[in-house]
Image (cartoon, rainbow, N blue to C red):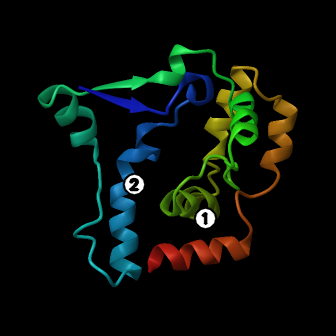
């Protein structure tokens, strides 16, 4: 059995240390919920390191296929084609797709620890010659989201 994955090396070849990434997402979510949440997380799906990397791969025999690695993929070209061919619009924050990611990357990591999680994404685009270093330096001058968005995201995730 296979899982078709949207990941790709073209735009995601620079990875952050595992300690900063997905392995801590569940712990962070539970910590935020413990402090601010009211509703139980019993039915909220969480995929941890064990299930994602060991159980599904070795016990269940699932294989992950990154289809975008099988074709020449340039992020900007793909975005333009999607916009032209359909009613798709790019996310306001290109690397943030869910409420928890928006909060984690745009508010929590950036404002609490002064760590900009966009750096690895931008580095991948520089290495694969999809954006210039100068353009990244200009983008990095602005925070991932403004203070109003950060407060909205905090309230949303806390609820």
Q: In the image shown, does 77 or 52 lie closer to the viewer?
A: 77
Furthest-bottom residue in this view: 38
Say left or right for 17 vs 153.
left
| Residue under label 1 | 107
Looking at the rendering, in which quadrant would you find the N terminus?
Answer: top left
Q: In the image, is residue 154 above or below residue 11?
A: below
Furthest-left residue in this view: 59
Are the residues tagged 1 and 2 within 8 Å (C-beta)? no
Say left or right for 4 vs 146.
left
Q: CA distance from mark 1 to mark 2?
A: 14 Å
- Mark 2 lies on a secondary structure that is helix
- Residue at 78% across / 47% down in the picture? 140
> Which x, y percent locates residue 51?
22, 41
Q: In the image shown, does 108 or 156 lie closer to the viewer?
A: 156
- Mark 1 lies on a secondary structure that is helix
Per the rendering, the mark at residue 138 is none
Q: In the image shown, does 4 or 58 lie closer to the viewer?
A: 4
Looking at the rendering, in which quadrant would you find the C terminus?
Answer: bottom left
Dot 1 or dot 2, earlier in sequence = 2
- Residue at 83% across / 28% down in the picture? 132
| Residue under label 2 | 25
> Which x, y percent locates residue 105?
58, 55
Q: In the image, is residue 100 above or below residue 51?
A: below
- Residue at 52% across / 36% down in the picture? 16
> Which x, y percent locates residue 67?
47, 23
Q: Residues within 10 Å of mark 2 (few under 14, many from 20)?
A: some
């Amino acid at each position: 059995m296979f899982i078709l994955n949207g990941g790709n090396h073209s735009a995601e070849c620079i990875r952050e240390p595992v300690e900063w990434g997905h392995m801590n997402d569940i712990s962070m979510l539970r910590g935020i919920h413990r402090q601010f949440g009211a509703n139980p997380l019993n039915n909220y799906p969480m995929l941890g390191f064990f299930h994602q990397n060991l159980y599904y791969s070795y016990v269940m025999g699932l294989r992950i296929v990154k289809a975008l690695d099988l074709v020449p993929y340039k992020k900007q070209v793909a975005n333009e084609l999607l916009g032209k061919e359909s009613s798709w619009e790019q996310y306001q924050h290109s690397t943030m797709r869910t409420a928890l990611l928006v909060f984690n990357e745009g508010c929590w990591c950036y404002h609490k620890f002064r760590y900009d999680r966009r750096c690895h994404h931008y580095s991948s685009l520089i290495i694969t010659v999809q954006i210039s270093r100068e353009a990244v330096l200009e983008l990095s001058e602005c925070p991932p989201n403004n203070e109003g968005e950060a407060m909205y995201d905090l309230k949303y995730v806390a609820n």
